[in-house]
Image: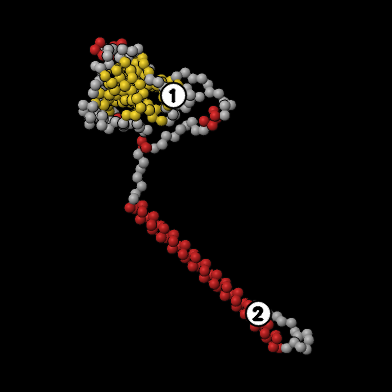
Amino acid sequence: MSMYSSLPQRETDSLEELKLGQKQQDAGAEGLQGRRFTLILWSIFFISLCSVLDLLSLVYLGNKLAIQPLEAIPFNDLPFLSSYSHLDEIYKKGDVKATPRDPLKQLPYTLTPVDSSAPEDIQSPYPNQFKSPYGMIPYSERRTVVTPEVSSVAQFFGADYGMENCSMVLTIPPDARSPNMENAFFDVWALDWGRTIDIRRLSWNSKPPRGKLLGTFSAQGPSTQQTQPHECPSGTYQHVEISCREGPCDLHITASGSEEFNGIYMTQYQTI
């Protein structure tokens, strides 16, 4: 870069002063170049440090994943995705009134006996099956069996929003009322379990623990009896066990089809 200096205008200007100014300009240019070189060195150091840290992080994560591989979440542990999201916000304001709905009856999804006299045995919920070209298919039947040793575990699912008060109902048809069962009483227990039950592995020892006593039915009472309503939030499983409380329990009820409400089932009532 060429540098220009003015010619002496007065007699007092000398060649030495011109040389001194030239030296100062050269020193300033050298200082600027030095600062630029230092900045470049620090930038290279910072970029190199970040690269080393990224490489070490990748090595650490690779070793961690190799030692502890990710496991698939069991299907029954997956959260239920509700299709009724944010409806609470609509009804809380009071501007929208829900359409009145009659109570809904719901048949159990599964109804399986468990035997205390054989606590490790897995009972078949479908003793009667028919054979198809693709295997054994159960008949559409539900067997409510209660004896002093045998209880029945029923599984329901509260799918409907705004129908979140539930009662467990027992209907004993005339052909299931035997004279020797007049003094029998049956308890209905809520089971402490928030997921679906695998009926292929269900036994007396593996069934969920009992929680709240929902009610007691009497063989001498009306043909249809029900418990007091209890909360059953939408998107939750409702599991109950009907067992013998006292007396000569000998209850065997078989219901077939989708509209035969005999044995144990659930009724949902509107809550909005």
Direction from residue 137 to residue 161 in the image, left or right: right
Residue 189 in sight in this render = yes
Query: In which image quadrant can residue 135 be found?
Result: top left
Residue 195 place in picture, x, y as percent: 36, 33
Residue 34 place in picture, x, y as percent: 57, 75
Query: In which image quadrant can residue 71 be found?
Result: top left
Residue at (47, 32) in percent of width and height: 83
The vertical placement of 60 against 182, above or below, is: below
Nearer to us in this view, 4 or 93: 93
Nearer to us in this view, 256 or 121: 121
User: Mark 1: which amino acid?
Assistant: Asn
The vertical placement of 86 against 138, above or below, is: below
Q: Say which element carries label 1.
A: strand
The vertical placement of 63 against 252, above or below, is: below
Q: CA distance from mark 1 to mark 2?
A: 91 Å
Q: Earlier in the sequence, mark 1 or mark 2?
A: 2
Could you classify mark 2 by the number of other residues whose Cα lies within 10 Å: few (under 14), some (14-19), or many (20 or more)?
Answer: few
Residue at (37, 18) in percent of width and height: 226
State yes or no: discs 1 and 2 in contact (Cβ < 8 Å).
no
Residue 265 in sight in this render = no
Q: Say which element carries label 2.
A: helix
Could you classify mark 1 by the number of other residues whose Cα lies within 10 Å: few (under 14), some (14-19), or many (20 or more)?
Answer: some
Residue 55 place in picture, x, y as percent: 42, 60
Residue 56 place in picture, x, y as percent: 41, 60
User: Mark 2: which amino acid?
Assistant: Gln
Residue at (57, 26) in percent of width and height: 94
Residue at (38, 58) in percent of width and height: 59
Disc 1 versus disc 2: nearer the observer: 1
Direction from residue 53 to residue 128 in the image, left or right: left
Report the residue marked by disc 2.
Answer: 25
Query: In which image quadrant can residue 1 be found?
Result: bottom right
Report the residue marked by disc 1.
Answer: 165
